[in-house]
Image: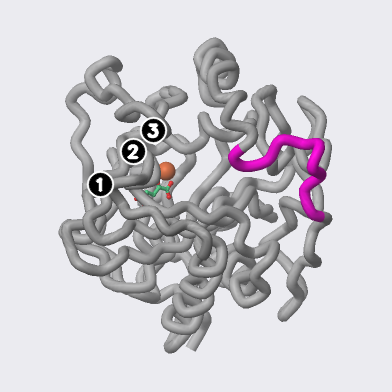
Amino acid sequence: MAERTATLLEIERFQQQGFVLISGLLAGQEGKHYGDAVDRAVADRTQHDHRSLEEKSRYEQSFQQCLNLWEDHSAVRPLSFHPRIGRAAAALLNAESVRVWHDQALYKEAGGRETDPHQDQPYWPISEARTVTAWIPFQSVRKENGAVGYMPGSHRLGLREYADIFTHTGLDLDAFPETRNGRFEYVDAECGDVVFHHGLTVHRAYPNTSDLTRRVHTVIYFADGCTRSEARHPSVDRPGVGIGEKIASDLTPVAWPRPPGDLPATPPPPSPLLPGWPGWKGQRKGQRRRQRKGGNPS
Ligand SMILES: O=C(O)CCC(=O)C(=O)O
Ligand SMILES: [Fe+2]
């Protein structure tokens, strides 16, 4: 049997709606295997954090976020550079080649609050709107444990708004004629499925009212050839990619196509002189102003 990839129907649905569920993209035990690997990586990254959910910030109550696990957790690297997921991402973006912008685990703890409405791409200094996130759940996800809802077609509205989900309530849907009457379509998913959404699609997620953590890994891809815009971000600041330059470094390696079995090398560690997560938080105010001025998706 041919390997599962995005079908023409799924590609068309993604282009129209800005999101698509690709069921069974991970085969057999892969979902379980990678779920265990990401669990270990998240446990390692959060080992010194003993705060209860109530003690965490509003943003952290939506999920535990662990970035770039592929860098320091070799068992996660084959997932973030999985050929079948990277190939599907390239097909959805109609790109010959895609790079990883960054990966991140988004573990919504039991009792965790909703994820506020937002678009992703305004957080990233990528000029061209050719980005897609693969959202990879490690268990069934339903309304009860934090399913994600997407506003169909919202990636085509011309909206590119920075929403402060870090300290505020996210995108004010009533503030924009484009989103005022928009509805969200919530997607149920199983372990092995991958839900893709475009970088400009407005989305949010239900709170987790179950007793178990909702375990999800995500990988953000961009079409190879995209260029850097003004705002700060470690994915371009660390390797020193200049404004207007093509985003291509060993921190954002090609995910598809790669020779079979080949994985990228570990990139150099962040320089202590460069702001990294969460040091770049201080840039968010300026970033928001610039993104607002910038306006249209390119
Ligand atoms: O999983 C969630 O709660 C939110 C996911 C999300 O915002 C994303 O993957 O961009
Ligand atoms: Fe998001």
Picture quadrant of residue 209: bottom left
Q: Which kind of residue does numbered mark 3 sit on?
A: Ile
Asked whether disc 2 touches disc 3, contact meaning CB atoms under 8 Å apart, the reply is: no
Comparing labels 2 and 3, the label whose residue is closer to the camera = 2
Residue linked to disc 1: 113
Residue 256 visible to the viewer: no
Region of the chain picked out in magenta, as a range: 269-278
Is residue 192 positioned above or below 28 on the image?
above
Q: Choose between 150 and 38: the one closer to the eye.
A: 38
Asked whether disc 1 touches disc 2, contact meaning CB atoms under 8 Å apart, the reply is: yes
**Residue found 47% across the figure and 57% down from its top:** 49
68 in the magenta segment: no
Residue linked to disc 2: 58
**Residue found 52% across the figure and 25% down from its top:** 297
| Mark 1 Cα-neighbour bin, 10 Å: few <14, some 14–19, many ≥20 | many
Q: Which circle's residue, 2 or 3, is located before the other in the chain? A: 2
Residue linked to disc 3: 165
Q: Choose between 254 and 285: the one closer to the eye.
A: 285
**Residue found 81% across the figure and 29% down from its top:** 242
Q: Give the distance between the C-alpha atoms of the residues marked 2 and 3, in whole angstroms.
A: 9 Å
Viewed as shown, does residue 204 lie left or right of 220?
left
Q: Choose between 212 and 257: the one closer to the eye.
A: 212
Comparing labels 1 and 2, the label whose residue is closer to the camera = 2
**Residue found 31% across the figure and 43% down from its top:** 115
| Mark 2 Cα-neighbour bin, 10 Å: few <14, some 14–19, many ≥20 | some
What secondary structure is the magenta-colored segment mainly?
Answer: loop
Image position, residue 271 (x, y; %)? 81, 44
